[in-house]
Amino acid sequence: MQGLFDRFFNHLKFERNVSEHTIRNYRIDLAQFLDHLAPAAGDGNRPEVELAAIDNITIREFMAGLYAKGKRKSSIARKLAALRSFFKFLCRERLIETNPASLVSSPRQEKRLPKFLEIDQVIRFIELPDTQTDLGKRDRAILELLYATGIRVGELVGLRVSDLDFSSRMVLVRGKGRKERRVPFGEKSVEALQAYLEARERLLASPPKSSRDHPALFLNYLGTRLTTRSVGRLVEKYIKRSIEVSPEISPHTLRHTFATHLLNAGADLRAIQELLGHARLSTTQVYTHVSTQRIMEVYDRTHPKA
């Protein structure tokens, strides 16, 4: 079974151009499914799994186990999506005749509105890093760029220095499926990025010696590329320093804040879709619900006969 998984992941990477983040999650999901089918013995060996023995009932039992463990519906839905994609690949390779996961319904998702910060909150949050230090300059540039562009954290850490165009104030972003888009950024981001780029030279010179032509835009103190997890920890650090920001806030919240503020200011939904890199307009439309909820809160608070 592991050999089939490896073929599937190569298919995702080289034929479908799926992001490393998605492939990493699918690895976890399929490994959990394999543990459900054939738990490893004490010596680390596990029994062989016959593909023909896997049907929709098997997959429903796996999902039932996830429900029993209290897993969120969004997590269970992603695991089902991984299984559907895997068995679809096996059908394409003519290793099985039908996709058993296609007969299993996805769990009904909770309607959760994205969290976002108010304008004054996000400004104060972005200004928390100590720009007297090199890492503080980097952190300020990261927070400025996340809010100014609405890009995903995975897209942020994938940026190269050459992706920045200060003359047009645009950044080249590689999104899901490696689709490229150009996103504008404002004057505050320009100032923060230019201050950081000077500090970046010093980070490159830090021990251990790094390659002087390292392409990554955002570096850690060792002079190597930041990871998505590092950015998550960075944001958590500043959340702890802020008395105004909820501990539930994450780097993705700055993306939601970006979209919500644009919509509240009258931006066209199609333009927001393009900036966010959403493949479907329906994905972007969640922000219309946020905006409507905001309007109702203002109405209830201010109208004398609300």
Image: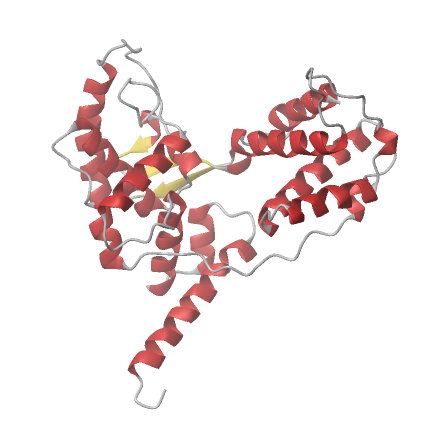
Compared across the picture, whether 63 is left or right of 121 comes to right
Colouring: secondary structure
Percent across and percent down for residue 105 are 74, 52
Location of the N terminus by quadrant is top right
Percent across and percent down for residue 139 are 25, 35
Classify residue 195 by image quadrant.
Answer: top left
Report whether residue 187 is seen. no
Answer above or below: position of 297 versus 258.
Answer: below
Question: For the view shown, which residue lies furthest in the top direction?
Answer: 209
Percent across and percent down for residue 222 are 28, 17
Answer above or below: position of 193 versus 213.
Answer: below
The residue depicted at 51 percent of the width and 48 percent of the height is: 278
Question: For the view shown, which residue lies furthest in the front direction?
Answer: 42
Percent across and percent down for residue 31 are 66, 29
Classify residue 261 by image quadrant.
Answer: bottom left
Report whether residue 141 is seen. yes
In-front residue for pair 35/26: 35
Question: For the view shown, which residue lies furthest in the bottom direction?
Answer: 305
Classify residue 238 by image quadrant.
Answer: top left
Answer above or below: position of 26 versus 296.
Answer: above
The residue depicted at 38 percent of the width and 69 percent of the height is: 294
In-front residue for pair 66/276: 66
In-front residue for pair 193/47: 47
How many marks on residues?
Answer: 0
Location of the C terminus by quadrant is bottom left
